């Protein structure tokens, strides 16, 4: 297809699977002797690409998650004496608890929400969890729990599975939030509510982080520049230069060092009890959600104005390639 | 308690149940010959108080819901060819579909999301629903479904019940979103995602509607003025004066005309097929989500700055009254 249309630049943005695709296409082109400049561009709310300090998209989902936990907890705190005592919010993150950890930014002092974070990195233990919920409700009046969709038990099995797989063959998760909430009800008897923002968290452009928006633009711009400079099988990544003040720059990295390697949450980001984040985590996450990049709003409809690109399709030169829904 | 502390003004904001409480307290005070000025102040995301044009809180949850449907649908639209085809979002609304209807503001043209709204006012019919989902996916490529938590079947039973009751004795709902999504999967085989924003929708101060914030302030101010003027058993309500341009004012209404009466969605707000909203609905809802009332953000933490009132407690003059969790 690339040869039929004489396409010589291939920029592909995404996460781990997309980096792998970029690498494979670059290798196939080399094998076929077809001159092609393949540039990977980092973009994934999962924040699990190695080498780069962060992945564009993540800062905004992190901001959305922290703000949502803060807001919903104010709601729960206002009525906990006579109503809901436990609020459970499920966040994305199949194998790494980056988004769950970012929720921890909502609280700064002891007793601030979220009171419990359940990471995919820490095997879930029901008794320790329930004891912590009980102690929190008795001390604070209510308990906010953030749970990663990828929460696993001691045997490494997901607590909840929707029984479906995504385009890359991963098991589709969902439903661990309601499951945890139901556990709280049956074991402790507390009135609960649960939320699963699902796609809302990763599409909430209205609450984008300014740092994130700037970094997203910078990697895209660098990607085009790398392509025009004839580079191949590389990715522009973000390097944190300093934290106070927060400074970063774009540097070049080979895709071979990125594809198929999942960056886990560093162990020193998780508190010793396994239910919260450390100061080291806060130092890493905080600059990423800093600043607002509010979209323009339409004065009549009250909705944000999101641009839709006019995609001008080329005339096809090859017969259709059948897409199968794996 | 009021007598012990010589409290003569009682302002109570809330929805139907709170209006009922205000009325009862006013009646009891009268029976006891205790001079008390009881003022109800409208505030409920359910938007189901009669007399008033709208209830403060509703405009903001409406804005949040419409924006979230718009954003998540852009996400689904971008990947529907090879991934998720049906997105289901569950919204609040026990007996009236006000919030579900407001989601309809996200779409203006045919084929815009949300493609299907499931109202508590319209008994759910599985076959008609599945046929509509299938037709939408085949025509548009994907289908966004908004479902009210209070969706009922032909027998008037809630499709999903969490088996718990709230402080006022209402059955606690939740889970109809996942249920509908699972139905789509089993009947049609489409890959799905579902979201249940739960408290996030009603606490999303970061996305407050300016109209809503102004009306909330106005009814609170009027409530204090009514109390100081010696009024009793009344509520300041919002009267829409004109729609183009949108103008409103605060007028006085007796609580007897408000308490225990649920304002349902007018039948002419629901389209004939039962799956969408009409132009009349749009005329009503649109001004309510107009404008933004963005909170100030902290430059370091990236979080909104929400004030917490320093509640100065009086010294108790009576022994504690035991609260029971109904």
Image (cartoon, coloured by chain):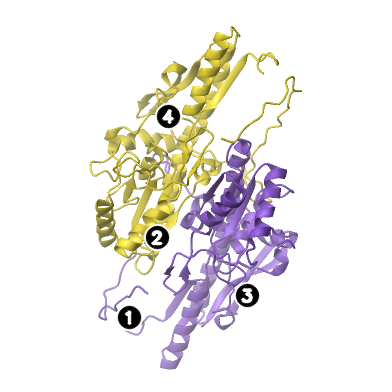
Chain colours: A yellow, B purple
Closer to the chain start, of discs 2 and 4, is 4
Q: How far apart are marks 2 and 4 (CA)?
A: 32 Å
Q: Quadrant of residue A205?
A: top right
- Tell me where residue A37 appears, x and y as whole percent: 57, 13
Badge 2: few (under 14), some or many (20 or more) residues near its Cα, within 10 Å? many
The residue labelled by disc 3 is B51
The residue depicted at 49 percent of the width and 31 percent of the height is A56
Whether residue B306 is visible to the viewer of this picture, yes or no, is no
Residue A67, above or below B122: above
Q: How far apart are marks 4 and 3 (CA)?
A: 52 Å
Q: Do labels 1 and 4 share a chain?
A: no
The residue depicted at 32 percent of the width and 36 percent of the height is A281
- Tell me where residue A8 appears, x and y as whole percent: 63, 13
- State the mark number for residue A76: 2
Q: Which is in the foreground here, disc 2 or disc 1?
A: 2
Q: Distance between the residues labelled 1 and 4?
A: 57 Å
Question: Does A199 sit left or right of B169 as displayed?
Answer: right
Chain identity of mark 2: A
- Tell me where residue B217 appears, x and y as whole percent: 53, 63
Chain identity of mark 1: B
Q: Do the residues labelled 2 and 1 touch (CB within 8 Å)?
A: no
A48 vs B99, nearest the viewer: A48
The residue depicted at 29 percent of the width and 77 percent of the height is B322
Give the secondary structure at mark 3. Answer: loop
- State the mark number for residue B5: 1
The residue labelled by disc 4 is A54
Question: Does A293 sit left or right of A117 as displayed?
Answer: right
Q: How far apart are marks 2 and 1 (CA)?
A: 28 Å
B28 vs B148, nearest the viewer: B148
Q: Do labels 2 and 3 share a chain?
A: no
Q: Distance between the residues labelled 1 and 3?
A: 33 Å
Give the secondary structure at mark 2. Answer: helix
């Amino acid at each position: 297809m690339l040869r039929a249309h004489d396409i010589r630049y291939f920029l592909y943005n995404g996460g781990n699977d997309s980096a792998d695709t970029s690498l494979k296409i670059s290798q196939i082109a080399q094998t076929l002797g077809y001159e092609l400049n393949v540039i990977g561009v980092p973009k994934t709310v999962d924040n699990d690409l190695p080498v780069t300090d962060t992945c564009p998209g993540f800062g905004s989902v992190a901001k959305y998650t922290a703000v949502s936990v803060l807001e919903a907890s104010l709601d729960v705190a206002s009525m906990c004496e006579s109503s809901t005592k436990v609020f459970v919010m499920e966040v994305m993150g199949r194998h790494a608890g980056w988004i769950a950890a970012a929720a921890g930014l909502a609280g700064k002092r002891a007793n601030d929400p979220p009171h419990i974070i359940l990471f995919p990195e820490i095997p879930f233990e029901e008794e320790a969890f329930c004891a912590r919920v009980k102690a929190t409700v008795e001390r604070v009046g209510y308990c906010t729990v953030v749970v990663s969709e990828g929460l696993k038990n001691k045997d490494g099995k997901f607590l909840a599975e929707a029984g479906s797989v995504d385009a890359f063959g991963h098991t589709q998760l969902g439903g661990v939030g309601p499951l945890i909430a139901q556990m709280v009800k049956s074991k402790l008897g507390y009135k609960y509510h649960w939320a699963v923002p699902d796609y809302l968290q990763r599409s909430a452009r209205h609450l984008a982080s300014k740092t994130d928006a700037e970094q997203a633009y910078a990697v895209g711009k660098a990607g085009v520049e790398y392509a025009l400079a004839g580079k191949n099988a590389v990715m522009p990544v973000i390097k944190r230069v300093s934290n106070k003040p927060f400074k970063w720059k774009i540097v070049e990295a080979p895709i071979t060092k990125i594809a198929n390697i999942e960056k886990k949450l560093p162990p020193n980001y998780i508190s010793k009890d396994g239910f919260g984040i450390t100061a080291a985590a806060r130092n890493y996450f905080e600059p990423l959600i800093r600043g607002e990049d509010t979209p323009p709003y339409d004065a009549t409809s009250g909705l944000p104005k999101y641009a839709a690109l006019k995609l001008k399709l080329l005339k096809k030169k090859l017969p259709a390639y059948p897409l199968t829904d794996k």
